[in-house]
């Protein structure tokens, strides 16, 4: 799935274009020769045309911060298991910050996170029942 930051809709699969607004994801396509260019391109690398597709935009700051926080969470989780669970207080603080960040997510991303968590829950319960 790809999320379009321009029209704020979710596109199934991994399309090059948003099916709702027509903007491209992470690339720029030339309207003359249909050559795929990097998103930073101002001219087509193949024919030199300036008529390139519009990109859907980059990730907002809150998503970048959420990615950093999730990596810190994984790091703290690994350290807490290696250090005999001595880092539980910072871990719980971090989980609290993650829950606060969740409140500011768009509804579409909340639905995706709930779906992923339900799949993980099913796999964990399924593995426990098989043991």
Image (tube, grey):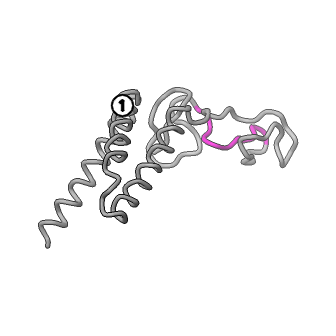
Q: Image height check: is 41 above or below 7?
A: below
Q: Position of residue 109 (x, y in %)?
A: 39, 36
* Above or below for 101 versus 68: above
Residue at image mark 1 = 100
Residue in the foreground of this view, choosing between 70 and 10: 70
Q: Position of residue 75 (x, y in %)?
A: 44, 55
- Picture layout, residue 131 above or below residue 72: below
- Tell me if residue 22 comes above or below residue 13 in the rendering: above
Q: Residue at x 54, y 31 (%)?
A: 5
Left or right of residue 73: residue 123: left
Nearer to us in this view, 29 or 84: 84
The quadrant of the picture occupied by the N terminus is top left
Q: State the extent of the magenta-drawn residues as a range.
A: 22-32
In the rendered image, residue 107 lying in the magenta stretch gets the answer no
Secondary structure, magenta segment, majority class: loop
Q: Residue furthest right?
A: 48
Q: Is residue 114 left or right of residue 18?
A: left
The residue positioned 12% from the left and 66% from the top of the image is: 129
Along the line of sight, the residue nearer the viewer: 81 or 55: 81
In which quarter of the view is residue 43 placed?
top right
The spot of residue 69 in percent (x, y) is 46, 43
Q: Residue furthest front?
A: 86
Q: Residue 29 magenta-drawn?
A: yes
* Secondary structure found at label 1: helix
Q: Could you tell whether 29 is left or right of 129 in the image?
A: right
**Residue 85, image quadrant:** bottom left
Which residue sits at x=47%, y=39%? Answer: 66
């Amino acid at each position: 799935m790809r999320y379009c930051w321009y029209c704020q809709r979710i596109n199934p699969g991994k399309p090059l274009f948003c099916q709702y607004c027509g903007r491209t994801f992470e690339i720029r396509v030339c309207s003359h020769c249909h050559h795929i260019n990097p998103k930073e391109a101002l001219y087509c690398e193949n024919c030199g045309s300036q008529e390139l597709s519009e990109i859907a935009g980059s990730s907002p700051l809150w998503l970048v911060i959420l990615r950093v926080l999730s990596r810190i969470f994984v790091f703290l989780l690994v350290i807490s298991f290696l250090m005999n669970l001595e880092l539980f207080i910072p871990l719980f603080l971090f989980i609290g910050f993650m829950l606060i960040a969740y409140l500011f997510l768009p509804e579409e991303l909340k639905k995706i996170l709930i779906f992923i968590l339900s799949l993980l829950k099913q796999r964990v319960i399924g593995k426990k029942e098989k043991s």
